[in-house]
Image (tube, helix red, strand yellow):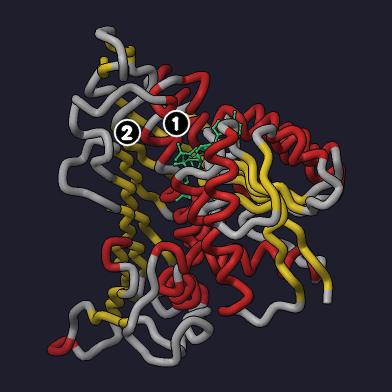
């Protein structure tokens, strides 16, 4: 059996989610590989040591460059803040290592293009953490769209709205600085762009608006306030290559929305509606139903839907956020050991960043922009 040895950089929110998925994946999916949690990096040695123990990794380091250069690491898994993705991924690619990177891929479409070209030239596998696309309910939505059951898609309405920065007393952080985070709500909540591309295809033109609502935030341990350098909320109109039109809204100040990643896909014969806060349900409307029976029906995911049965033999019991990461890790490991294409790879993540770059240009120039 092949071994895939992972070096994980980052022990925060995503570091933990990746560690859970790396350890649980082989128990869920019977892949032909042994996944070894080899090396864990965090710049603070005590944290690296503590999480190495808790996440059940073999070794730890406080130097990500040592992790990337380590001969026992096959995959570099990047769960560090956005501004570090480029250097870490480029170093890993230079060492011929596969790269599993959190979203957004980088700070700009230019950096993402360089990273994509470098990875493709080196022939390494890449995967970017657009985990919501791995949800069985969304895999089912894609199946329904591709089967033609809702006809030709004419409209996509998507939101990714949350309230994690709605409270003005929440302190200043790397997420609010251009050179560390890139874009704000659009950059952080770009999952919905990836979702639109998955379900409806390429986005050709956008017309966007964006706004910073809370312009300054308290700096921890200081009386100073930090300037917020990126947008709190944004929306855009879009035209898809295949002919549909649509809208996307992103916000990090939308009181009450905890994981408001939603989409409504309208076709010529029916519609689909999904809300990540109810991630085990897909709403399906068919215009073919008798007129006195028409209405959205709720499909609860179960073993007959993509990837669900590997977790649970009983329908409607439900999967959670971390299970999407387990499916993501399955795709990564299978892609590596079976030399299979992986989605979303760096090129797919670049397509998201290209939409965001066009959205910002559209806002600055106050006009429709080609992606
Ligand atoms: P976090 O602040 O919780 O953790 C960041 C971690 O990065 C730190 O704990 C540390 O271990 C590591 N780190 C920081 N500086 C470092 C350095 N110089 N060298 C090595 N490691 C360093 O952040 P997070 O929420 O886990 O975000 C990390 C990434 O994950 C971001 O790119 C973010 O956009 C992405 N993210 C993705 C999702 C998702 O659903 N896919 C959700 C949240 C965050």
Residue at the (25%, 80%) spot, across then down: 298
Q: Is residue 188 visible?
A: yes
Which of the 4 image quadrants contains residue 106?
top right
Task: Please provide percent x and percent y for residue 167.
Answer: 18, 31
Which quarter of the rendered picture does the N terminus lie within?
Answer: bottom right
Is 147 displayed left or right of 250 in the figure? right
Residue at the (77%, 67%) spot, across then down: 340
Q: Which mark is residue 359?
A: 1
Task: Please provide percent x and percent y for residue 308.
Answer: 47, 81
Task: Please provide percent x and percent y for residue 330.
Answer: 63, 69
Q: Nearer the viewer, residue 29 or 118?
A: 29
Residue at the (62%, 34%) spot, across then down: 85
Residue named by callout 2: 234
Task: Please provide percent x and percent y for residue 246.
Answer: 36, 49
Disc 2 on helix, strand or loop?
A: strand
Crowdedness of circle 1 by 10 Å Cα count: few (<14), some, many (20+)?
many
Q: Give above or below for 178 relative to 263.
A: above
The reply to whether callout 2 and callout 1 are in contact (CB within 8 Å) is yes
Q: Nearer the viewer, residue 223 or 339?
A: 223
Q: Give above or below for 66 relative to 56.
A: above
Q: Is residue 117 visible?
A: no
Which of the 4 image quadrants contains residue 211?
top left
How far is the residue under mark 2 from the one under mark 1? 9 Å
The response on whether ligand 1 sits within 8 Å of label 1 is no
Front position among marks 2 and 1: 2
Which of the 4 image quadrants contains residue 29?
bottom right
Is 307 displayed left or right of 208 in the figure? right
Name the residue at the left extreme: 292
Q: Nearer the viewer, residue 337 or 144?
A: 337
Disc 1 on helix, strand or loop?
A: helix
């Amino acid at each position: 059996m092949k071994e895939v040895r992972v070096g994980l950089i980052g022990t925060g929110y995503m570091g933990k989610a990746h560690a859970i998925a790396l350890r649980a994946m082989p128990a869920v999916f019977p892949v032909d590989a042994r996944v070894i949690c080899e090396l864990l990096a965090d710049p603070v040695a005590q944290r690296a040591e503590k999480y190495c123990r808790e996440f059940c990794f073999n070794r730890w380091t406080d130097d990500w460059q040592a992790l990337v250069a380590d001969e026992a690491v096959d995959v570099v898994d990047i769960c560090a803040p956005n501004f570090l993705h480029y250097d870490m991924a480029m170093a890993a690619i230079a060492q011929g290592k596969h790269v599993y990177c959190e979203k957004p891929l980088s700070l700009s479409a230019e950096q993402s293009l360089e990273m994509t070209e470098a990875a493709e030239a080196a022939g390494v596998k890449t995967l970017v953490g657009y985990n919501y696309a791995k949800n069985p309910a969304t895999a089912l939505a894609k199946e329904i769209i591709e089967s033609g059951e809702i006809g030709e898609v004419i409209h996509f309405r998507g939101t990714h709205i949350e309230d994690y920065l709605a409270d003005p007393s929440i302190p200043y952080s790397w997420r609010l600085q251009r050179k560390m985070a890139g874009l704000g709500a659009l950059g952080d909540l770009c999952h919905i762009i990836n979702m639109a591309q998955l379900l409806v295809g390429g986005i050709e033109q956008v017309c966007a608006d964006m706004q910073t609502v809370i312009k300054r935030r308290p700096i921890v341990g200081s009386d100073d306030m930090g300037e917020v350098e990126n947008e709190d909320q944004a929306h855009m109109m879009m035209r898809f290559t295949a002919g549909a039109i649509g809208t996307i809204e992103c916000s990090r100040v939308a009181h009450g929305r905890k994981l408001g990643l939603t989409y409504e896909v309208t076709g010529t014969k029916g519609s689909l509606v999904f809300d990540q806060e109810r991630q085990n349900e897909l709403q399906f409307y068919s215009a073919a139903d008798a007129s006195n029976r028409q209405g959205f029906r709720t499909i609860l995911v179960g073993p007959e839907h993509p990837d669900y049965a590997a977790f649970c033999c009983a329908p409607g019991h439900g999967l959670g956020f971390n299970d999407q990461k387990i499916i993501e890790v399955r795709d990564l490991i299978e892609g590596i050991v079976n030399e299979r294409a992986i989605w979303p790879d760096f090129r797919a993540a670049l397509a998201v960043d290209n939409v965001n770059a066009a959205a910002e240009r559209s806002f600055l120039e106050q006009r429709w922009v080609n992606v």
